[in-house]
Amino acid sequence: MERFDGIKNVMKHIEDEIIVCNIGFPSRELYEIKDRSKNFYMLGSMGLASSIGLGLAMSKIKEKVIIFDGDGSILMNLGSLITVFNQNPSNFILIIFDNGCYGSTGNQCTYAQNVNLLEVAKSIGFKNSYDYNEIDFKDILKSKQEGPIFIHYKILPGNADSPIIDISPEEIKNRFMKSIK
Amino acid sequence: MDSSEAVYQGLKRAKIDFIVSLPCVNLGKILKIIETDEKIIHVPVTREEEGIGICAGAFLGGKKTAILMQNSGLGNCVNALTSLYQLYSLPLVMIMSHRGTKGEPIIGQVPMGIATPKILEAMDLKYFNPKTPEEAIETVANSWNISMSEKRPVSVLLDTSYW
């Protein structure tokens, strides 16, 4: 299964949760699958999805914040996992779509091919860290949350033929902020 | 007035309620004060760029945000300040201990000290350079509103001699 179907599977269960989505094809694919005001599409700043998500989770404590990140981008900002663990937000769910490559730039391999990111999260101390294929995501999403959740979703390389997002950054921001006010 | 207290009072007047930080020897006292302020969420981060990302999320979530850091960390933030902040027109107050300026005892701080204002200028970002606590309190107090009206980050550079 490639990323497009992975995102589709997750989106089946999303209701009013906030989503922060990684730059490149992940955002384009999400935009095609289910555009909504509560999606924040990153158009730059690779690596910062989990950080933007943490800031949101800490300022909107009654909302659930789900972050769609990738293996290459979390590797750029591994310190973020340390900060998230220490801040311990109970409304933060990080999903790593791990295809072992930099998908948006031509599928160059990442070191995640040789390192299990789920084990990395566990070693930091994340109590709620799961392999997507071993859980019922809906149960995890809808049950009372204690502390941050880390979900490792192993997928195959490949991008869908999704169009470039045709709404402006300003509009993405404005409608997003309005929807979470 | 005490140089650290002036910055803190300025942040309070600006109604900043969300701060990320990395330490500098000159920021030690402010960080201690902030840690005891229950109205400010304080998030120590592992790297400056990460903090810039966290502040972006916090602003989207309704907070008034600032980063406290050494100017060396500005180099770690450049892509986020452009491809996140400039792109989405986001505000932020950046309080920087500006090392490598007059009176700096550590030679390693000098190159980035010289580059710092030029890097801000290259990103077309406004910065202020108050020399006294009296000036600093006013500058910091106004910084958030300036940042909001300009829809981009504003920096306050506090030289080695300021402290």
Image (cartoon, rainbow, N blue to C red):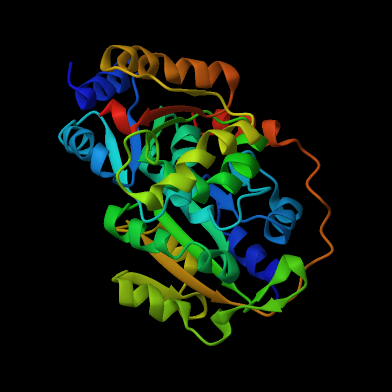
From the top left corner, tell me how far across and down residue B23 is, in percent. Answer: 29, 46
Quadrant where the N terminus of chain A is found in the figure = bottom right
Give left or right: position of B34 versus A6. left
Task: Name the residue nearer the viewer: B72 or A167.
Answer: B72
Give left or right: position of B67 versus A98. left
Residue at 48% x, 61% y is A77
Give left or right: position of A129 versus B77. left
From the top left corner, tell me how far across and down residue B82 is, in percent. Answer: 63, 40
Residue at 50% x, 34% y is B60
Q: Decide if residue B6 is in sight here.
A: yes
Quick check: B54 above or below A73?
above
From the top left corner, tell me how far across and down residue B109 is, in percent. Answer: 39, 48
Quick check: A135 above or below B132?
below
Task: Name the residue nearer the viewer: A41 or B21.
Answer: B21
Task: Name the residue nearer the viewer: A124 or A111.
Answer: A111
Q: Decide if residue A17 is in sight here.
A: no
| Figure quadrant of residue B86 | top right
Give left or right: position of A18 versus B68. right
Residue at 59% x, 24% y is B151
